[in-house]
Image (tube, grey):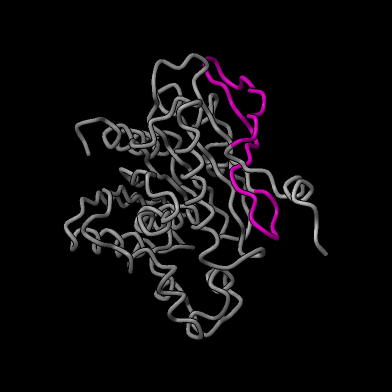
Amino acid sequence: MSLPPDLAALLAPPDPARLPLPPAALPSPGVRLLRGVPYLVPDGHRPLELDLWLPEKPTGPLPVVVFVHGGAWRTGLRGDPGPAFRSWRPGPFARLVQAGFAVACPGYRLSGEAVHPAQVDDLSAALAWLHVRSGELGLDTARTVLWGESAGGHLAALLALTSRRRTPSTPSVPPVTGCVTWYAPTDLLALAGDPADGHTFEALLVGGAPADVPDRTRDASPVHHVTADAPPFLVLHGTEDHIVPGDQGVRLAAALREAGVPADLRLIEGADHLWYGLSDAEVERCFALSLDFSRRRTTPSSH
């Protein structure tokens, strides 16, 4: 079936780089929130959206934190940094805005929708969208830190280590200047209790038992993408993590240091996954460490 050119153009998916932005909510003093902004319309999949947290009265181009949610690559909400933060008022993203950042929280295709590398490709598209619209949004995308928790930390690390080769069509997108990971998987083959099991979360991500798809499992593992031009990392991991053992954080930090990349590894004593087992003050400290790292990595003299 052929269509007239004008009709074919009308039926084409909209370009997220040109769509109008949604109206802003005001969730906290001095903070505006653009919720559900489309950034990518993949062929055959649902449109992908991000939430954008901005100051109500911006004072100039802002450094950017891109926060990637967890959920075992299988579930999760883009605006949820984990149960330890759900009672915070103001919440962590509003606090980052109040500290001088813009915050983008992108959704991405989950493992029930597509397998690796779809997730990190989606996040790469989010970086490109932020860069294309940085002028109207008041963003300085040359000062961007990736920050993720659990599976989101894995994806943040993977994107930080591979972003240069994932944006060939948009070469002007600047590289990220830092990455924060919280209790993130980093070496999926080592993480697999039984590499022949095709039903684990990591197997669902890579589309098969890790032992059956070793090349894809390796490609999905941040430790195997470390090079000397990687950005500095802050790696936080609990010593009592029963879901993603702390050795995963140690492996990433060791690979970065071996390549000559600054890697600040903090093993949080007594912390389980999701910072379970920590006091409120200790959770605050994890957040403060991450904020301080993000601030240092987005000052002009740091990169």
Figure check: 238 above or below 174: below
Figure check: 111 above or below 285: below
Query: In which image quadrant can residue 64 be found?
Result: top left
Tell whether 174 sits left or right of 80.
left
Tell whether 65 sits left or right of 41.
left
Total marks placed: 0
Name the spot of residue 76 as percent of width and height, x first: 62, 51
The magenta segment is 18-47
Question: Residue lying farthest right?
Answer: 1
Tell whether 99 sits left or right of 251.
right
Query: In which image quadrant can residue 3 be found?
Result: bottom right
Residue in the picture at 33% in, 51% down: 235
Q: Nearer the viewer, residue 249 or 267?
A: 249
Name the spot of residue 227 as percent of width and height, x first: 25, 62
In the picture, the quarter occupied by the C terminus is top left
Question: Residue lying farthest front?
Answer: 4
Q: Nearer the viewer, residue 247 or 164?
A: 164
Residue in the picture at 37% in, 39% down: 144
In the picture, the quarter occupied by the N terminus is bottom right
Q: Nearer the viewer, residue 168 or 103?
A: 168
Name the spot of residue 207 as percent of width and height, x first: 58, 75
Name the spot of residue 42 as percent of width and height, x first: 64, 55
Residue in the picture at 43% in, 71% down: 188
Residue in the picture at 48% in, 54% down: 150
In reply to whether residue 142 is colored magenta, the answer given is: no
In reply to whether residue 28 is colored magenta, the answer given is: yes
Figure check: 28 above or below 160: above
